[in-house]
Amino acid sequence: MRDYAGCLRLLKDQRTLGKEAKQELYELRNLRVGKIAPDIEGEDLDGVKFKLSDYRGTVTAVVFWASWCGPCMQMVPDERKLVERMKNRPFVLIGVNGDGDRNKAKQVTVKEAMTWRSFWNGANGAIGPISRAWNVRGWPTVYVLDNNGVIRAKEVRGKELDAVVDQLVKELAEEKTK
């Protein structure tokens, strides 16, 4: 009699590799710089429905964050400064929160003076529907979109995020004066 356990493990690994390949292909087709970002439809931390596309016409930073993510929370002071500096300019920072507990996330936004809106990723937290749709593999994940919803930068933080946002806001201002 043959031992089929090894064959079954290989089949299981192939499905896993197939899934990985599918995710990579999806990211290449839909989430790379130069592509229009997939829309997000969901609720904010207060339960109010909204869409990412509601913010077309502005430069948008999409930040996947969670209170349990140390690097996410370390970014908050810089994000707060960016939002304040860009006040009254065509820029918005939109969070996607990966806490499974909406109330806890709301408490964190109050405590940390996070004045920007965040989608709630659902009770499954980091593996909720928005992070799955955007193929998020690590927290934080940052995308910067231009005023047309085109992904112009990924995984930028701190001064690099500031520079990208400044450049896109400048381009938008120049476009409007033409």
Image (cartoon, grey):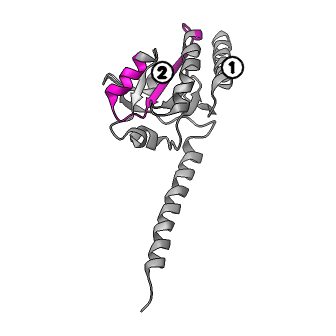
Q: Which residues are magenta?
A: 85-110
Q: Is residue 170 left or right of residue 81?
A: right
- Where residue 14 appears, as percent x and y from the top left, is 51, 67
The answer to whether mark 2 and mark 1 are in CB contact below 8 A is no
156 w.r.t. 57: above or below: below
Q: Is residue 87 magenta?
A: yes
Q: Is residue 44 visible?
A: no
Q: Nearer the viewer, residue 96 or 165?
A: 96
Residue at x 44% of width, y 75% of height: 8
Q: Nearer the viewer, residue 73 or 171?
A: 73
- Where residue 83 appears, as percent x and y from the top left, is 55, 14
Q: Nearer the viewer, residue 113 or 91?
A: 113
97 w.r.t. 22: above or below: above
Residue at x 58% of width, y 13% of height: 81
- Where residue 93 appears, as percent x and y from the top left, is 52, 21
Q: Is residue 72 magenta?
A: no
What residue would you read off at disc 2? 55
Q: Residues within 10 Å of mark 2 (few under 14, many from 20)?
A: some
Q: Residues within 10 Å of mark 1 (few under 14, many from 20)?
A: few
Say what amino acid the circle numbered 2 marks: Tyr
Res 74 → quadrant: top right
Q: Is residue 84 left or right of residue 49?
A: right
- Where residue 18 appears, as percent x and y from the top left, is 51, 61
What residue would you read off at disc 1? 167
Cα–Cα span, label 2 and label 1: 18 Å
